[in-house]
Amino acid sequence: MFHKTLVFLGILFFSTVIFPVQSRPITRIVFHGLNHAANLSIIKKIMLDQHKQKSLQDINNIIKTLYNTNYFINVRVKKIKETFFFYVTEFPKIKKIFFSGNNILSESFLNNSLHRFGIFEDYPFNLKKYNDFLSFLKECYYNRGIFGIKIKPLYTKSLNNNVSININVYENAFFNVSDIKIVGNKQYPNAFILKKFFQFNRYFFFPRFLQKQYTFSQFKEHLLELKNFYKNNGYLKIKINQLKVFENQDHNSVSIVIELCEGEKYTFKKIVTHQVKSEYFNKNIDIKRVFIPAVNFQESDVLFLKKNKKLYAHVGFSNVKVTIRHDINEIDKSVIIYILIEPKEQFFINKIYFVGNTKSKYSFLKKIIKTSKHSYCDKYTIKKNCQLLQNTDLFNTVYFKTYKAKGLLNTINVYYVLEDKKDNQLVCSAGFDSKSKLLLKFLYYDKNFLGLGYRIYSNVAKNLYLTQVNTYFSKSLESLKNFTFKFRCFFDSIDKTYFDPTKYIDKYYGFDSKLITPVIKNKRFSVSIGSFMARFPYFSPQFSLMQYINFFRDHLKSKSLLRNFSILDFVFKYVFNYNNIHLENLVKIGNQIKLIGKFTLPFSDNKFHKITLSSENFFPLEHTKSFLLHMYSALGIGFTFGKNIFPIYENYYIGGSQSVRGFQNNSLGPRAFYYYLKNLLSKKDNKSNDQIICESANPVGGNVMIHTNMELLFPHIHTHNSLLGYFQYGIFLDTANLWDSSLRYMLNIFKNIHMIKFYNPSKIYMSTGAFVRWFSFLGPVTVTFSIPLLYEGISNYNLLRFYVDFNTP
């Protein structure tokens, strides 16, 4: 019991006595990792005060102060006895800042912007501030309409924890738009606005795959067109509140949001045109005209201004003053337009002169222009006359000058100043080949024959076996609103010594007259009528030829006619051509549709109709930037009336650089086969045992043709030398088919069933390959490497895998 009491008293004594423990003061601070920040004033101050006694709160304050200097990424503290060790990680120090590619934003603006974000040379590099600056820089370009801006920042670390910043800016004027949203439009749907004003189609399955490329000026014009459209339809207070641009995740395209405020719709109440009293016109008459137009707005102030000025200019008042004022009624949302017209002096034309022309006669030029002596002096009509003279393509430049006539009041002399073009040319050339030896060519061209605007083109080619003469005569018909009349005559003849039996015809000659309309909205139409004669010198035992000649056996009265059998046709031809293909930065864009047809008229030996429809398209693949897709397709068919036979010399031919590459020219399609048949042209029945069939490789063409070409054109390769021009390259896929529809009836007379395969209409010819086209100063030169894919029945002789073609764009 005594021991327990003693232990309890001892515990009670020690628990009630407090022993004060004195903690050791911090007498030393050591930094590890200091480099660029060693000379900071705060570091020096800490080192000077390190022997002073510091508490834990003082150490926390030191850590906060170090972070606030923005020199340190990380600060760690470790205490060992009386010493605190500070382990610091510094931000890299910016050694140099470079900019390249910036033309729109100046160097001083970029440097000042860097300073706003606390980015200086010889200062710490803060990645967050750097990214904030890049976002600000992109926003600056967006505000200036450069939505295609691409910024490629690069910072490189070097020794001693230094960093160099290099910001490359690509100020691309073009930008790709993957999506456009219209907000606030109530009257017109999004699809209508996007298609009409932005040529933008939104696809349901691939909304962001197909992109549209714009420049800011183009996009701004589209916005202005949209705004004017609303105004012209009565929404006078239409506003585009905001245009938001968002960069997509692919960093190659943007999405745009257009916020509209349509406002209320206004209608015309009336238009009042008031003509004030003038010293020169209607001195004692005050004319006041009132028009009540349609309900919706259809014309802007600019159109009102132009129409009224033109109205008075046509009667000689070229300096009329027009003032337009609007009276808007906000209650009934109506508008009254007041047009105040103040005529001034009225002028008349005294004389008309043509200066500078040395070839065109005065009578010819006088017929072109629309004004005459003593008519009203209308500056708009005079400008139109200059354009009419320019359209003749006889002058390099056309402009006018006006002078007051001496001694006459309010009269003007008009001078049309012309600069003649070189409008005639005579070229003689000679060539040589192993077959025809020497070939002579003569070309004469005159665009202003006898100074009366007649155009003459004559081409003559002559060698030992060939004679070709082509002469064209054309004249613009001012009386028919610039229609063109064209007359052509031609003559082709081959000497019998060098005649090729596979060509059938040794003479082909005739003439035609054509009437051509002017180009109206990219459309042109022409019709022609003419007479053509073809002569067959003799007959080879070729089935298609004998089939054709056999049709005329009733007209042959003697065997001598078989040696010089001629066909005379009167043909009517029509051509429709829609062509909006144009060049944009040396690249063809647009499409062309062409329809050519011709048929024989009564009293012709043949009775046939031939129609050819072709389509050509160039359109860019916008999501692949500068790539271009070129597609050409053609469909041709020739048919006859009644029991007539389609002329063999009118057949279609395919193969070669102009149709299916990889094959010789005109080498595809049905082949000729020959036979021996006694008394072929007699009316007696022929016996089958008299028939002997021989196949050949000679093409005979066909009356039905289908042909397609597809080319993927890559971006041009430009050279710095204008003489070298530029290069274009791409890949292609050509497909075609050709057959003679009449053979399915005629082959039944043969027992050789395998001959039907020779004329199989389901046979398709196909080739693919690549090409390089050089647009030189001498003309285009194309190098093609092709691989025939489908060529059943074609001999290796007719395959052409590599060739060079000249003057074929």
Image (cartoon, grey):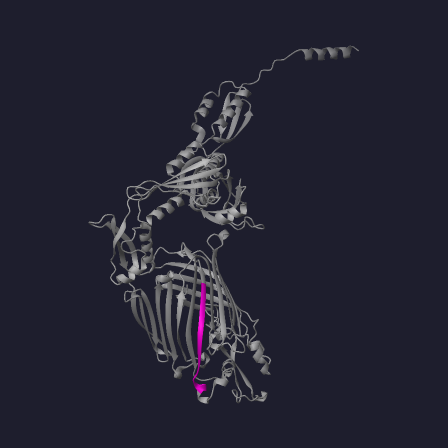
At 51% from the left and 38% from the top, the residue drawn is 264
Query: Looking at the picture, how far across and down is residue 204, in whole percent?
Result: 58, 50
Q: Nearer the viewer, residue 761 or 648?
A: 648
| Residue for point 55% across, 25% down | 79
Q: Extreme left residue here?
A: 407
Along the line of sight, the residue nearer the viewer: 28 or 171: 171
| Residue 421 seen in the figure | no
Q: Is residue 718 magenta?
A: no
Residue 323: quadrant of the picture: top left
Q: Quadrant of residue 104?
A: top left
Total of numbered circles in the picture? 0
Q: Is residue 361 visible?
A: yes
* Residue 271: % across, % down: 42, 41
Q: Position of residue 629 (x, y in %)?
A: 48, 58
Q: Nearer the viewer, residue 122 or 15?
A: 122
Residue 184, given in percent of the width and then of the height, sits at 53, 39
Q: Quadrant of the N terminus?
A: top right
Between residues 43 and 353, which one lies in front from this camera angle? 353
Q: Which residue occupies the extreme right position in the image?
A: 1
Left or right side of 512 for 763: right
Of all residues, the one furthest to the front in this rendering is: 284
From the image, give the main secondary structure of the stretch colored magenta: strand
Residue 575 included in the magenta stretch of the image: yes
Quadrant including the C terminus = bottom left
Q: Is residue 55 above or below residue 659?
A: above
Boundaries of the magenta span: 561-576
